[in-house]
Amino acid sequence: MKAAVYKGNGELSVEEWKDRMPEEKEVQIRVSYCGICGSDIHILQGSEDHRMQLPSVIGHECSGTVWRVGSKVERVRPGDRVVVWPVKACKECFACKEGYGHVCQNLKVRGIETEGAFQYAWTLDEEALVRLPDTVSMLHGALAEPLAICCHVVKRGNVKAGDFAVVIGGGPIGIMTALVAKAAGADVLLSEVNEKRLEKAGEMGIRTVNPVKENLLETVKDLTSGKGADVVFETSGSQPGVDSMVQLPKVHGTVVLVAIYGKPMLVDLKQLYYYEKNVVTARMQERADMEQAITLLAEKKIDADKIITSVLPLADIRKGFDRCMDRNGCEVKVMIQCGADEREEGKA
């Protein structure tokens, strides 16, 4: 069975991998598609080696079909179409007992601390699976996990219809956060320096600004009659993004920290203090966010075909990573086809 195996120190290769049969409460799915995530890029760059048992298969943004089930599996059966919720909580810590398993104090992320999805067949616990309706294709379904992160982010920002929201950063999470906020009824402005990504976002109906060419603060003031943004989502992970995020919200406005910051950032706290601006964080997603993401896809409130900019076979996964890491590129979401798709199986 072929899989993309990460061995540490940036080494990733497609090779034969063990085919592990499911235990009593486990399920084996045939993986259809898996998206390349920013965390996968961090893994390839070596920053997450300490979290992993190497060698291991990575990847978690996937769709698939239930293939084999353990003797005590109750939630799914062979043939079910599913996506994977990557949160593996301990259920014993304070966070879990308070209902915040997605930020479990002993959290394991499937595809990082455990084996992942860039393989033909993936064996994992049945609790990870969320059903995918027939109205959502397997290719589009592989967007459910990153889209669910954006649903969680927008929920954390308490976005309401009529709000003015700014998204800083036009990567996959930034663009999808803008789309989810728009679906919630917000007026959205996306700030990004890559002109190709700005063009992609514009094709999706997102209003955009390049802060290198225009004054972002003045643009927000002009669009809000001087008030400022109701909510600002910082998805860029950059110092210029952090500099902007504290200036843009209105009095009692909200900043949502979305990016994973690889190094400490300087924050002008007086910008937050003077106007009692709120700062919240958002990590991972809850199961309800997965359900919301699937609903958005099923109702076609998210144009998945515009978000998915490339589909490559598993054998070309390294090429997919190279495209994702090209800062001047035009990719939004690169999908890897790990197994047979619906057309090959006569389902579409």
Image (cartoon, rainbow, N blue to C red):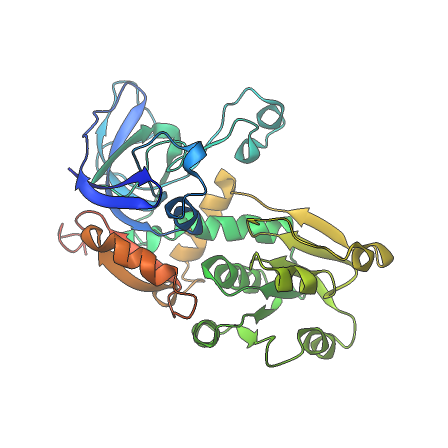
Position of residue 163 measured from the top left corner of the image (x, y, whole percent): 68, 64
Q: Is residue 182 left or right of residue 147?
A: right
Q: Give the quadrant of residue 199.
A: bottom left
Question: Is 81 situated above or below 202?
Answer: above
Q: Is residue 109 visible?
A: no
Name the residue located 38 percent from the left edge and 53 percent from the top edge: 143
Extreme residue in the front direction: 9
Position of residue 200 measured from the top left corner of the image (x, y, whole percent): 43, 73
Extreme residue in the right direction: 274
Q: Is residue 233 left or right of residue 108?
A: right
Q: Is residue 156 left or right of residue 18?
A: right
* Image quarter hosting the C terminus: bottom left
Position of residue 31 measured from the top left corner of the image (x, y, whole percent): 25, 43
Name the residue located 30 percent from the left edge and 18 percent from the top edge: 72
* Image quarter hosting the N terminus: top left
Q: Give the quadrant of residue 77.
A: top left
Front-most of 206 and 46?
A: 46
Front-most of 307 and 328?
A: 328
Tally of numbered tags:
0
Q: Is residue 53 visible?
A: yes
Question: Is 194 situated above or below 172?
Answer: below
Name the residue located 60 percent from the left edge and 23 percent from the top edge: 97
Q: Give the quadrant of residue 204.
A: bottom left
Position of residue 347 measured from the top left corner of the image (x, y, whole percent): 17, 52
Front-most of 232 and 113?
A: 113
